[in-house]
Amino acid sequence: MKQHVQAFSLWALLAPLCLLVNAQFNEPPGQRREQTFKVLEFEHGTVDQRFEGTLRYYCTFRGKWNKQRHPNDFPRSPSWSAPVILSHSNGYRMWTGTETATLGVESIAEEGFTTIITNEFNNAGFETYMMVVGERMFNTSDSQHLPPINVTFEHPFLSSMVKMTPSPDWFTGFSDFRTVAFETENYFNRFVIQCFVWDCGTDGGQTYTA
């Protein structure tokens, strides 16, 4: 897969309100999950990662794909496919920036369809926890409040995808965001993720309408 410029950001808020602490966001060096997104803002929380219950995040998709930001060959009728967010364990990968795309990722990137990725999610067994699908967006610089997504001690990671239409196989999203801070081992109360455009590598087109 190939990386391009920023396309959207995701805002997420934990249902139980927690303590606000501003600090530098740190990830372990060399991990695959730091390749696919940039954390713009975050707030540390007070809920320990070993909390035995389910925690719920309320997420907002904010599109930043418009002619002003991306003037080169901007398409006439752009849209986002329905955004997909998954919660999962460290043993599951929806997609990464360095590995061959699965058939489910290919289907989203090329067609915007979620049927195959849903099957992959269900077949992963214990490694996956919850899947949320939003609605298609025809205003690519608009926002959408997504259904809440749940995480647990065994499933603290979030991954997401959304197709850019028209395009051969371009999408944006993030992979393997850990909702638990490494410094405190507590869940984040709030975070804002900046995402980028990726070429899935399954179609050779070089323009929006190829």
Image (cartoon, grey):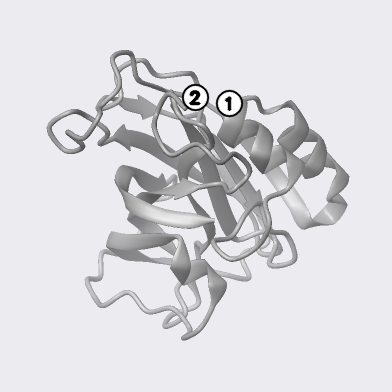
- Kindly state the secondary structure of the residue where label 2 is placed: loop
Q: Residue at x 43, y 39 (%)?
A: 206
**Rendering coords of residue 161 (x, y %):** 53, 41
Badge 1 amino acid: Gly
Q: Is residue 186 above or below residue 2?
A: below
Disc 2 or 1, which lies upstream in sequence? 2
Q: Is residue 179 left or right of residue 189?
A: right
Q: Is residue 181 above or below residue 128?
A: below
**Rendering coords of residue 103 (x, y %):** 75, 41
Q: Please state which of residues 47 and 59 is positioned toward the viewer in this rendering.
A: 59
How many residues crowd around disc 1 within 10 Å: few (fewer than 14), some, or many (20 or more)?
Answer: many
- Residue 81 bears which disc, if any? 2
Q: Do labels 2 and 1 touch, CB within 8 Å? A: yes
**Rendering coords of residue 119 (x, y %):** 81, 35
- Kindly state the secondary structure of the residue where label 1 is placed: loop
Q: Residue at x 30, y 21 (%)?
A: 75
Mark count = 2
The answer for how far apart the CA atoms under marks 2 and 1 are is 5 Å
- Quadrant where the image shows the N terminus: bottom right
Q: Is residue 11 left or right of residue 117?
A: left
- Residue 112 bears which disc, if any? 1
Q: Residue at x 39, y 28 (%)?
A: 145
Q: Residue at x 53, y 45 (%)?
A: 160
The residue most toward the left is 68
- Residue 19 bears which disc, if any? none
Badge 2 amino acid: Ser
